[in-house]
Image (cartoon, grey):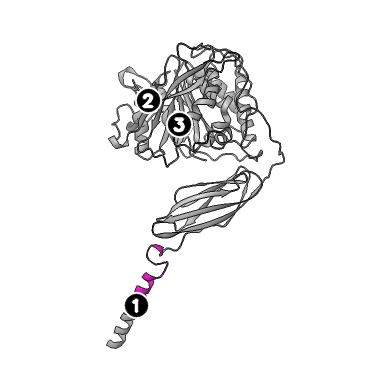
Protein backbone atom coordinates (compact mmCIF):
# COMPACT_ATOMS: atom_id res chain seq x y z
CA UNK A 1 0.00 0.00 0.00
CA UNK A 2 2.78 2.34 0.98
CA UNK A 3 4.50 1.43 -2.24
CA UNK A 4 1.40 2.28 -4.28
CA UNK A 5 0.99 5.71 -2.61
CA UNK A 6 4.66 6.47 -3.24
CA UNK A 7 4.28 5.62 -6.95
CA UNK A 8 1.17 7.79 -7.26
CA UNK A 9 3.03 10.68 -5.60
CA UNK A 10 5.96 10.33 -8.02
CA UNK A 11 3.58 10.22 -11.01
CA UNK A 12 1.67 13.32 -9.81
CA UNK A 13 4.91 15.28 -9.39
CA UNK A 14 6.04 14.23 -12.85
CA UNK A 15 2.76 15.39 -14.37
CA UNK A 16 3.07 18.78 -12.65
CA UNK A 17 6.64 19.21 -13.91
CA UNK A 18 5.57 18.20 -17.41
CA UNK A 19 2.65 20.69 -17.37
CA UNK A 20 4.99 23.48 -16.40
CA UNK A 21 7.34 22.67 -19.26
CA UNK A 22 4.66 22.38 -21.92
CA UNK A 23 3.44 25.36 -23.98
CA UNK A 24 0.20 26.64 -22.52
CA UNK A 25 1.38 26.26 -18.94
CA UNK A 26 2.10 29.11 -16.55
CA UNK A 27 1.32 32.40 -18.30
CA UNK A 28 -0.49 30.45 -21.02
CA UNK A 29 -2.65 28.54 -18.56
CA UNK A 30 -5.76 30.42 -19.72
CA UNK A 31 -5.02 29.54 -23.35
CA UNK A 32 -3.72 31.53 -26.28
CA UNK A 33 -5.46 34.71 -27.41
CA UNK A 34 -8.36 34.10 -29.78
CA UNK A 35 -11.21 36.06 -31.33
CA UNK A 36 -14.70 35.73 -29.92
CA UNK A 37 -15.85 35.77 -33.54
CA UNK A 38 -13.81 35.36 -36.72
CA UNK A 39 -16.48 36.75 -39.03
CA UNK A 40 -18.33 40.03 -38.64
CA UNK A 41 -21.24 41.35 -40.67
CA UNK A 42 -21.95 45.06 -40.37
CA UNK A 43 -23.95 47.70 -42.26
CA UNK A 44 -22.47 50.92 -43.62
CA UNK A 45 -22.19 53.51 -40.86
CA UNK A 46 -22.75 50.93 -38.12
CA UNK A 47 -20.10 49.60 -35.77
CA UNK A 48 -19.69 46.32 -33.90
CA UNK A 49 -17.46 45.34 -31.02
CA UNK A 50 -15.36 42.18 -31.22
CA UNK A 51 -13.86 40.74 -28.05
CA UNK A 52 -10.51 38.96 -27.85
CA UNK A 53 -10.10 36.24 -25.26
CA UNK A 54 -7.02 35.53 -23.15
CA UNK A 55 -5.22 38.83 -23.72
CA UNK A 56 -3.78 39.25 -20.24
CA UNK A 57 -0.21 40.49 -20.45
CA UNK A 58 -0.39 41.16 -24.18
CA UNK A 59 -0.14 44.46 -26.02
CA UNK A 60 -2.73 44.69 -28.75
CA UNK A 61 -2.54 46.50 -32.09
CA UNK A 62 -5.33 46.47 -34.66
CA UNK A 63 -5.14 47.19 -38.38
CA UNK A 64 -7.83 47.16 -41.03
CA UNK A 65 -6.91 46.00 -44.49
CA UNK A 66 -9.09 47.99 -46.90
CA UNK A 67 -9.98 50.97 -44.73
CA UNK A 68 -12.18 52.16 -47.55
CA UNK A 69 -14.50 49.25 -46.73
CA UNK A 70 -14.19 48.98 -42.94
CA UNK A 71 -12.21 50.68 -40.21
CA UNK A 72 -11.04 49.11 -36.98
CA UNK A 73 -9.99 50.65 -33.71
CA UNK A 74 -8.84 49.28 -30.37
CA UNK A 75 -11.46 49.30 -27.62
CA UNK A 76 -9.60 48.80 -24.38
CA UNK A 77 -7.09 46.00 -23.93
CA UNK A 78 -9.23 43.08 -25.05
CA UNK A 79 -11.48 44.23 -27.87
CA UNK A 80 -11.74 46.26 -31.05
CA UNK A 81 -14.54 48.04 -32.89
CA UNK A 82 -15.27 47.53 -36.58
CA UNK A 83 -17.22 50.22 -38.49
CA UNK A 84 -18.69 49.75 -41.93
CA UNK A 85 -17.55 52.33 -44.46
CA UNK A 86 -18.89 51.06 -47.77
CA UNK A 87 -20.18 47.78 -49.11
CA UNK A 88 -17.53 45.11 -49.60
CA UNK A 89 -15.21 42.78 -47.75
CA UNK A 90 -12.21 43.59 -45.60
CA UNK A 91 -9.94 41.91 -43.10
CA UNK A 92 -8.96 43.09 -39.63
CA UNK A 93 -5.56 41.92 -38.41
CA UNK A 94 -4.93 41.85 -34.66
CA UNK A 95 -1.38 41.51 -33.44
CA UNK A 96 -0.72 40.61 -29.81
CA UNK A 97 2.78 40.85 -28.40
CA UNK A 98 4.17 39.68 -25.09
CA UNK A 99 7.69 39.94 -23.80
CA UNK A 100 9.85 36.88 -24.43
CA UNK A 101 7.14 35.19 -26.48
CA UNK A 102 6.31 35.13 -30.15
CA UNK A 103 3.62 37.49 -31.35
CA UNK A 104 0.15 36.14 -32.00
CA UNK A 105 -1.68 37.20 -35.18
CA UNK A 106 -5.46 36.90 -35.40
CA UNK A 107 -7.57 37.65 -38.45
CA UNK A 108 -11.21 38.69 -38.57
CA UNK A 109 -13.15 38.71 -41.84
CA UNK A 110 -15.55 41.63 -42.24
CA UNK A 111 -18.49 41.87 -44.62
CA UNK A 112 -20.06 45.32 -45.04
CA UNK A 113 -23.55 45.69 -46.48
CA UNK A 114 -25.12 48.91 -47.72
CA UNK A 115 -28.80 48.83 -46.82
CA UNK A 116 -29.60 52.26 -48.22
CA UNK A 117 -31.22 52.99 -51.56
CA UNK A 118 -29.60 56.37 -52.14
CA UNK A 119 -25.98 56.02 -53.23
CA UNK A 120 -25.43 59.62 -54.33
CA UNK A 121 -22.37 61.37 -52.97
CA UNK A 122 -22.84 65.13 -52.72
CA UNK A 123 -19.90 67.29 -53.59
CA UNK A 124 -18.81 70.66 -52.27
CA UNK A 125 -16.14 72.65 -50.58
CA UNK A 126 -15.43 71.61 -46.97
CA UNK A 127 -15.52 75.24 -45.94
CA UNK A 128 -18.59 77.44 -46.16
CA UNK A 129 -17.51 80.03 -48.72
CA UNK A 130 -20.50 82.33 -48.31
CA UNK A 131 -19.79 85.71 -46.74
CA UNK A 132 -21.72 85.84 -43.43
CA UNK A 133 -23.95 88.81 -42.72
CA UNK A 134 -22.46 91.32 -40.22
CA UNK A 135 -23.72 90.84 -36.69
CA UNK A 136 -21.47 93.07 -34.57
CA UNK A 137 -19.18 92.08 -31.73
CA UNK A 138 -21.66 92.71 -28.92
CA UNK A 139 -22.71 89.45 -27.22
CA UNK A 140 -26.35 89.90 -28.10
CA UNK A 141 -26.09 91.59 -31.51
CA UNK A 142 -28.87 90.48 -33.88
CA UNK A 143 -28.04 88.10 -36.68
CA UNK A 144 -30.80 88.69 -39.21
CA UNK A 145 -29.21 86.60 -41.96
CA UNK A 146 -27.70 83.28 -40.99
CA UNK A 147 -25.18 82.20 -43.65
CA UNK A 148 -26.29 79.41 -45.93
CA UNK A 149 -24.14 76.33 -45.56
CA UNK A 150 -22.93 74.50 -48.63
CA UNK A 151 -22.58 70.71 -48.62
CA UNK A 152 -19.42 69.72 -46.80
CA UNK A 153 -17.04 66.98 -47.71
CA UNK A 154 -17.95 63.64 -46.29
CA UNK A 155 -15.80 60.63 -45.48
CA UNK A 156 -15.62 57.74 -47.88
CA UNK A 157 -18.92 56.26 -46.65
CA UNK A 158 -21.89 56.73 -48.95
CA UNK A 159 -25.13 57.82 -47.26
CA UNK A 160 -26.18 55.23 -44.72
CA UNK A 161 -29.28 54.16 -42.84
CA UNK A 162 -29.87 56.16 -39.67
CA UNK A 163 -29.76 54.37 -36.34
CA UNK A 164 -31.07 56.58 -33.51
CA UNK A 165 -28.57 56.86 -30.65
CA UNK A 166 -29.18 55.12 -27.36
CA UNK A 167 -30.09 57.27 -24.32
CA UNK A 168 -27.07 58.45 -22.37
CA UNK A 169 -26.42 56.92 -18.96
CA UNK A 170 -25.09 60.16 -17.52
CA UNK A 171 -27.22 62.37 -15.31
CA UNK A 172 -26.67 65.95 -16.46
CA UNK A 173 -26.46 68.18 -13.42
CA UNK A 174 -27.83 71.60 -12.50
CA UNK A 175 -24.98 71.97 -10.04
CA UNK A 176 -21.55 70.42 -9.57
CA UNK A 177 -20.63 68.22 -6.62
CA UNK A 178 -18.52 69.77 -3.87
CA UNK A 179 -15.45 67.92 -5.19
CA UNK A 180 -15.52 70.06 -8.35
CA UNK A 181 -16.48 73.49 -7.03
CA UNK A 182 -14.23 76.49 -6.50
CA UNK A 183 -13.79 75.44 -2.86
CA UNK A 184 -12.47 71.95 -3.72
CA UNK A 185 -8.86 70.97 -3.12
CA UNK A 186 -6.34 70.90 -5.95
CA UNK A 187 -5.44 67.54 -7.43
CA UNK A 188 -2.13 66.09 -6.27
CA UNK A 189 0.81 67.87 -7.88
CA UNK A 190 1.53 64.96 -10.23
CA UNK A 191 -2.12 64.87 -11.32
CA UNK A 192 -2.33 68.45 -12.51
CA UNK A 193 -2.38 69.20 -16.20
CA UNK A 194 -0.15 71.86 -17.71
CA UNK A 195 -1.00 74.71 -20.05
CA UNK A 196 1.16 75.62 -23.01
CA UNK A 197 0.86 78.72 -25.16
CA UNK A 198 1.00 78.20 -28.91
CA UNK A 199 1.50 80.66 -31.77
CA UNK A 200 0.17 79.85 -35.22
CA UNK A 201 -0.01 81.60 -38.57
CA UNK A 202 -3.40 82.38 -40.04
CA UNK A 203 -5.21 85.17 -41.90
CA UNK A 204 -8.49 87.05 -41.68
CA UNK A 205 -10.10 85.38 -44.71
CA UNK A 206 -12.16 88.54 -45.22
CA UNK A 207 -13.61 88.44 -48.72
CA UNK A 208 -11.47 90.46 -51.10
CA UNK A 209 -9.12 91.63 -48.35
CA UNK A 210 -7.57 88.73 -46.46
CA UNK A 211 -4.72 89.87 -44.22
CA UNK A 212 -2.13 87.51 -42.76
CA UNK A 213 -1.84 87.50 -38.98
CA UNK A 214 -0.26 85.65 -36.10
CA UNK A 215 -2.57 84.29 -33.40
CA UNK A 216 -2.09 82.68 -29.99
CA UNK A 217 -4.02 80.07 -28.04
CA UNK A 218 -3.65 78.03 -24.86
CA UNK A 219 -3.42 74.25 -24.91
CA UNK A 220 -4.24 72.22 -21.77
CA UNK A 221 -2.36 68.92 -21.64
CA UNK A 222 -3.53 66.37 -19.05
CA UNK A 223 -1.18 65.08 -16.38
CA UNK A 224 1.01 62.33 -17.78
CA UNK A 225 0.46 63.47 -21.36
CA UNK A 226 2.00 60.76 -23.52
CA UNK A 227 2.80 61.27 -27.20
CA UNK A 228 2.33 57.55 -27.82
CA UNK A 229 -1.36 57.85 -26.89
CA UNK A 230 -4.23 59.56 -28.67
CA UNK A 231 -6.40 62.22 -27.03
CA UNK A 232 -9.80 63.72 -27.74
CA UNK A 233 -9.77 67.50 -28.23
CA UNK A 234 -12.18 70.14 -26.92
CA UNK A 235 -11.93 73.60 -28.50
CA UNK A 236 -13.31 76.00 -25.88
CA UNK A 237 -14.21 79.62 -26.72
CA UNK A 238 -14.54 82.68 -24.46
CA UNK A 239 -17.17 85.44 -24.63
CA UNK A 240 -17.32 89.09 -25.64
CA UNK A 241 -14.52 91.33 -24.40
CA UNK A 242 -12.57 88.32 -23.09
CA UNK A 243 -9.57 86.35 -24.35
CA UNK A 244 -7.92 82.97 -24.58
CA UNK A 245 -7.09 83.04 -20.85
CA UNK A 246 -10.72 83.34 -19.70
CA UNK A 247 -11.50 79.66 -19.21
CA UNK A 248 -8.38 78.15 -17.63
CA UNK A 249 -5.73 80.79 -17.00
CA UNK A 250 -5.56 83.98 -14.94
CA UNK A 251 -8.62 84.84 -12.88
CA UNK A 252 -10.10 81.34 -12.91
CA UNK A 253 -12.26 82.11 -9.87
CA UNK A 254 -14.65 79.19 -10.36
CA UNK A 255 -11.81 76.67 -10.60
CA UNK A 256 -12.30 75.36 -14.15
CA UNK A 257 -8.78 74.02 -14.53
CA UNK A 258 -8.88 72.50 -11.06
CA UNK A 259 -12.16 70.79 -11.97
CA UNK A 260 -10.69 69.31 -15.16
CA UNK A 261 -7.63 68.06 -13.26
CA UNK A 262 -9.80 66.45 -10.57
CA UNK A 263 -12.24 64.84 -13.01
CA UNK A 264 -9.32 63.18 -14.80
CA UNK A 265 -7.51 62.27 -11.56
CA UNK A 266 -10.69 60.69 -10.16
CA UNK A 267 -11.20 58.65 -13.32
CA UNK A 268 -14.56 60.28 -14.13
CA UNK A 269 -13.43 61.33 -17.59
CA UNK A 270 -10.71 60.22 -19.97
CA UNK A 271 -7.68 62.53 -20.23
CA UNK A 272 -8.22 65.05 -23.02
CA UNK A 273 -6.63 68.09 -24.65
CA UNK A 274 -8.41 71.45 -24.31
CA UNK A 275 -7.64 74.34 -26.64
CA UNK A 276 -8.73 77.87 -25.68
CA UNK A 277 -8.30 80.22 -28.68
CA UNK A 278 -9.77 83.67 -29.36
CA UNK A 279 -11.89 84.97 -32.21
CA UNK A 280 -10.42 88.45 -31.69
CA UNK A 281 -7.65 89.69 -33.95
CA UNK A 282 -4.40 91.52 -33.21
CA UNK A 283 -4.85 95.30 -32.93
CA UNK A 284 -2.89 95.99 -36.13
CA UNK A 285 -5.22 93.81 -38.25
CA UNK A 286 -8.49 95.09 -39.78
CA UNK A 287 -11.51 94.14 -37.69
CA UNK A 288 -14.63 92.37 -38.91
CA UNK A 289 -18.13 93.00 -37.51
CA UNK A 290 -18.92 89.27 -37.57
CA UNK A 291 -16.02 87.53 -35.87
CA UNK A 292 -18.21 84.72 -34.51
CA UNK A 293 -18.89 83.50 -38.05
CA UNK A 294 -15.63 84.53 -39.67
CA UNK A 295 -13.68 82.41 -37.17
CA UNK A 296 -14.87 79.32 -39.09
CA UNK A 297 -12.10 79.70 -41.69
CA UNK A 298 -9.22 80.20 -39.26
CA UNK A 299 -10.55 77.32 -37.16
CA UNK A 300 -10.69 74.86 -40.03
CA UNK A 301 -7.69 75.90 -42.09
CA UNK A 302 -5.14 76.91 -39.46
CA UNK A 303 -5.96 76.30 -35.79
CA UNK A 304 -7.08 72.66 -35.98
CA UNK A 305 -4.24 71.70 -38.37
CA UNK A 306 -1.67 73.34 -36.10
CA UNK A 307 -2.95 71.73 -32.89
CA UNK A 308 -3.48 68.28 -34.34
CA UNK A 309 -0.16 68.13 -36.12
CA UNK A 310 1.78 69.24 -33.02
CA UNK A 311 -0.06 67.22 -30.37
CA UNK A 312 -1.09 63.59 -30.09
CA UNK A 313 -4.73 63.41 -31.17
CA UNK A 314 -6.80 60.86 -33.07
CA UNK A 315 -5.86 62.64 -36.27
CA UNK A 316 -2.45 61.04 -35.86
CA UNK A 317 -0.71 64.05 -37.39
CA UNK A 318 -2.67 63.74 -40.64
CA UNK A 319 -4.59 67.02 -40.87
CA UNK A 320 -5.97 66.55 -44.37
CA UNK A 321 -9.67 67.31 -44.76
CA UNK A 322 -10.36 63.63 -45.38
CA UNK A 323 -8.74 62.56 -42.12
CA UNK A 324 -10.20 65.39 -40.02
CA UNK A 325 -13.62 64.26 -41.21
CA UNK A 326 -12.88 60.64 -40.37
CA UNK A 327 -11.82 61.60 -36.84
CA UNK A 328 -14.67 64.05 -36.12
CA UNK A 329 -16.04 61.91 -33.28
CA UNK A 330 -12.92 62.81 -31.32
CA UNK A 331 -13.37 66.58 -31.64
CA UNK A 332 -15.69 68.98 -29.76
CA UNK A 333 -16.40 72.71 -29.69
CA UNK A 334 -18.02 74.70 -26.87
CA UNK A 335 -18.21 78.31 -25.82
CA UNK A 336 -19.90 80.89 -23.63
CA UNK A 337 -21.97 83.92 -24.71
CA UNK A 338 -20.30 85.18 -27.92
CA UNK A 339 -18.45 81.89 -27.75
CA UNK A 340 -21.86 80.19 -27.75
CA UNK A 341 -22.68 82.02 -30.98
CA UNK A 342 -19.28 80.94 -32.32
CA UNK A 343 -20.17 77.34 -31.44
CA UNK A 344 -23.25 77.55 -33.64
CA UNK A 345 -21.82 79.62 -36.48
CA UNK A 346 -18.17 78.59 -36.81
CA UNK A 347 -18.46 74.97 -35.63
CA UNK A 348 -21.99 73.55 -36.03
CA UNK A 349 -23.12 75.42 -39.15
CA UNK A 350 -19.82 75.64 -40.98
CA UNK A 351 -17.66 72.76 -39.76
CA UNK A 352 -20.10 70.04 -38.75
CA UNK A 353 -18.08 67.57 -40.78
CA UNK A 354 -15.05 67.87 -38.48
CA UNK A 355 -16.88 68.21 -35.13
CA UNK A 356 -19.39 65.83 -33.55
CA UNK A 357 -19.86 67.36 -30.08
CA UNK A 358 -21.17 70.87 -29.44
CA UNK A 359 -21.68 72.93 -26.29
CA UNK A 360 -23.27 76.36 -26.75
CA UNK A 361 -23.71 78.08 -23.37
CA UNK A 362 -25.91 81.20 -23.14
CA UNK A 363 -27.11 82.23 -26.54
CA UNK A 364 -27.61 81.35 -30.15
CA UNK A 365 -28.77 84.19 -32.34
CA UNK A 366 -29.06 87.20 -30.07
CA UNK A 367 -32.17 89.37 -29.70
CA UNK A 368 -34.11 90.01 -32.87
CA UNK A 369 -33.80 88.04 -36.08
CA UNK A 370 -35.91 85.20 -37.40
CA UNK A 371 -35.98 82.42 -34.82
CA UNK A 372 -37.78 80.00 -37.14
CA UNK A 373 -35.06 80.49 -39.76
CA UNK A 374 -32.40 79.88 -37.11
CA UNK A 375 -34.11 76.69 -35.98
CA UNK A 376 -34.39 75.57 -39.62
CA UNK A 377 -30.66 76.17 -39.97
CA UNK A 378 -29.83 73.96 -36.98
CA UNK A 379 -32.09 71.19 -38.22
CA UNK A 380 -30.82 71.35 -41.80
CA UNK A 381 -27.17 71.06 -40.82
CA UNK A 382 -27.76 68.12 -38.48
CA UNK A 383 -30.08 66.23 -40.84
CA UNK A 384 -27.78 66.77 -43.84
CA UNK A 385 -24.83 65.57 -41.78
CA UNK A 386 -26.63 62.45 -40.63
CA UNK A 387 -27.73 61.73 -44.22
CA UNK A 388 -24.04 61.72 -45.19
CA UNK A 389 -23.15 59.23 -42.46
CA UNK A 390 -21.96 61.81 -39.93
CA UNK A 391 -24.01 61.39 -36.73
CA UNK A 392 -24.42 64.06 -34.08
CA UNK A 393 -22.45 63.03 -31.02
CA UNK A 394 -24.22 65.41 -28.66
CA UNK A 395 -25.61 68.95 -28.74
CA UNK A 396 -25.51 70.24 -25.16
CA UNK A 397 -27.28 73.59 -24.78
CA UNK A 398 -26.77 75.38 -21.48
CA UNK A 399 -28.44 78.44 -20.02
CA UNK A 400 -29.87 79.79 -16.77
CA UNK A 401 -33.26 81.09 -15.68
CA UNK A 402 -31.90 84.61 -15.09
CA UNK A 403 -29.50 84.68 -18.04
CA UNK A 404 -29.91 87.61 -20.42
CA UNK A 405 -29.66 85.18 -23.35
CA UNK A 406 -32.19 82.76 -21.90
CA UNK A 407 -35.40 83.31 -23.83
CA UNK A 408 -34.05 83.40 -27.37
CA UNK A 409 -31.90 80.33 -26.77
CA UNK A 410 -34.81 78.36 -25.26
CA UNK A 411 -37.24 79.40 -27.99
CA UNK A 412 -34.92 78.56 -30.89
CA UNK A 413 -33.99 75.15 -29.58
CA UNK A 414 -37.60 74.33 -28.76
CA UNK A 415 -38.53 75.11 -32.37
CA UNK A 416 -35.59 73.03 -33.64
CA UNK A 417 -36.63 69.98 -31.60
CA UNK A 418 -40.18 70.27 -32.91
CA UNK A 419 -38.96 70.37 -36.52
CA UNK A 420 -36.90 67.15 -36.52
CA UNK A 421 -36.78 63.65 -35.13
CA UNK A 422 -32.97 63.72 -35.24
CA UNK A 423 -32.61 65.74 -32.01
CA UNK A 424 -33.43 63.18 -29.34
CA UNK A 425 -33.51 64.47 -25.80
CA UNK A 426 -31.25 62.61 -23.41
CA UNK A 427 -29.68 60.71 -26.32
CA UNK A 428 -27.90 63.25 -28.53
CA UNK A 429 -29.41 66.47 -27.21
CA UNK A 430 -30.13 68.26 -23.93
CA UNK A 431 -31.05 71.76 -22.80
CA UNK A 432 -29.97 72.33 -19.20
CA UNK A 433 -31.57 75.37 -17.57
CA UNK A 434 -29.82 76.29 -14.33
CA UNK A 435 -31.63 77.59 -11.25
CA UNK A 436 -30.31 80.50 -9.19
CA UNK A 437 -28.00 79.18 -6.46
CA UNK A 438 -25.62 81.23 -4.29
CA UNK A 439 -21.86 81.00 -4.68
CA UNK A 440 -18.90 82.57 -2.95
CA UNK A 441 -18.20 86.31 -3.31
CA UNK A 442 -21.89 87.04 -3.95
CA UNK A 443 -21.81 84.96 -7.12
CA UNK A 444 -24.87 83.10 -8.39
CA UNK A 445 -25.58 80.33 -10.83
CA UNK A 446 -28.43 80.68 -13.30
CA UNK A 447 -27.08 84.01 -14.55
CA UNK A 448 -24.85 85.16 -17.41
CA UNK A 449 -21.63 84.37 -15.57
CA UNK A 450 -18.84 81.84 -15.18
CA UNK A 451 -20.63 80.39 -12.16
CA UNK A 452 -23.12 78.93 -14.64
CA UNK A 453 -20.66 78.12 -17.40
CA UNK A 454 -18.53 76.17 -14.90
CA UNK A 455 -21.50 73.80 -14.44
CA UNK A 456 -22.12 73.51 -18.17
CA UNK A 457 -18.45 72.67 -18.74
CA UNK A 458 -18.72 70.00 -16.03
CA UNK A 459 -21.63 68.39 -17.87
CA UNK A 460 -19.96 68.54 -21.27
CA UNK A 461 -16.73 67.01 -20.02
CA UNK A 462 -18.76 64.00 -18.86
CA UNK A 463 -21.04 63.63 -21.88
CA UNK A 464 -18.64 64.43 -24.73
CA UNK A 465 -16.74 61.54 -26.38
CA UNK A 466 -18.88 58.85 -24.73
CA UNK A 467 -19.29 57.00 -28.04
CA UNK A 468 -17.33 56.62 -31.23
**Residue 365, above or below 379:** above
Of labels 3 and 1, the one closer to you:
1
Distance from disc 3 to disc 1, alpha carbons, whole Å, reads: 61 Å
3D distance between C-alphas at marks 1 and 2: 66 Å
Count residues near mark 2 (Cα–Cα under 10 Å), then give few for <14, some for 14-19, many for 20+.
Answer: many
Q: Position of residue 94 (x, y in %)?
A: 51, 53
- State the extent of the magenta-drawn residues as a range: 13-28
Badge 1 local density, few (<14 within 10 Å), some, or many (20+)?
few
Q: Main secondary structure of the magenta part?
A: helix
Point out the tag, 3 or 2, that comes first from the N-terminus. Answer: 2
Residue sitting at x 42%, y 30%: 274
- Looking at the image, which residue is at 48% across and 50% down? 61
What percent of the width, then of the height, locates residue 276?
Answer: 43, 25
Is disc 2 placed on a helix, strand or loop?
A: loop
Q: Which mark is residue 460?
A: 3
Quarter of the rendering containing residue 428: top right
The residue carrying mark 2 is: 248
Vertical order, 277 against 141 (above or below): below
Mark positioned earlier in the residue sequence (3 or 1): 1
* Front position among marks 1 and 2: 1
Q: CA distance from mark 3 to mark 2?
A: 15 Å
Between label 3 and label 2, give the one nearer the viewer: 2
Circle 3 sits in a helix, a strand or a loop, which is it?
A: helix
Figure quadrant of the N terminus? bottom left
Residue for badge 1: 14
Residue 226 falls left or right of residue 366: left
**Which comes sooner in the sequence, label 1 or label 2?**
1
Which mark, by number, is residue 220?
none
Q: Determine crowd level at label 3: few under 14, some 14-19, many 20+ residues with C-alpha closer than 10 A.
A: many
Find out whether residue 14 is within the magenta segment: yes
Amino acid sequence: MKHTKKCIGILTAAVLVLQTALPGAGAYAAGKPKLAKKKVEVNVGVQKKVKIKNTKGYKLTVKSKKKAVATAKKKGKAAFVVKGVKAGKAEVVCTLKKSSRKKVTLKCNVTVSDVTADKTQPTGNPINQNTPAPTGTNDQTPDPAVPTVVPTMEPEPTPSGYTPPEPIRITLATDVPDAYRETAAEAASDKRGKIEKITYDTETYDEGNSVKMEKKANVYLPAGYDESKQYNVLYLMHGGGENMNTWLVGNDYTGNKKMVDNLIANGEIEPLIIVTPTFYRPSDVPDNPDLTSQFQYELRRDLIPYVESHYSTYAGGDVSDENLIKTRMHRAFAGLSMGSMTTYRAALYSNYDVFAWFGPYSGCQGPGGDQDAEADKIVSVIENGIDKGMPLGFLYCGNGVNDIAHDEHVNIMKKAVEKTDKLIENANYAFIDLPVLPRSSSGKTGEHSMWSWHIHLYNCLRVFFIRE
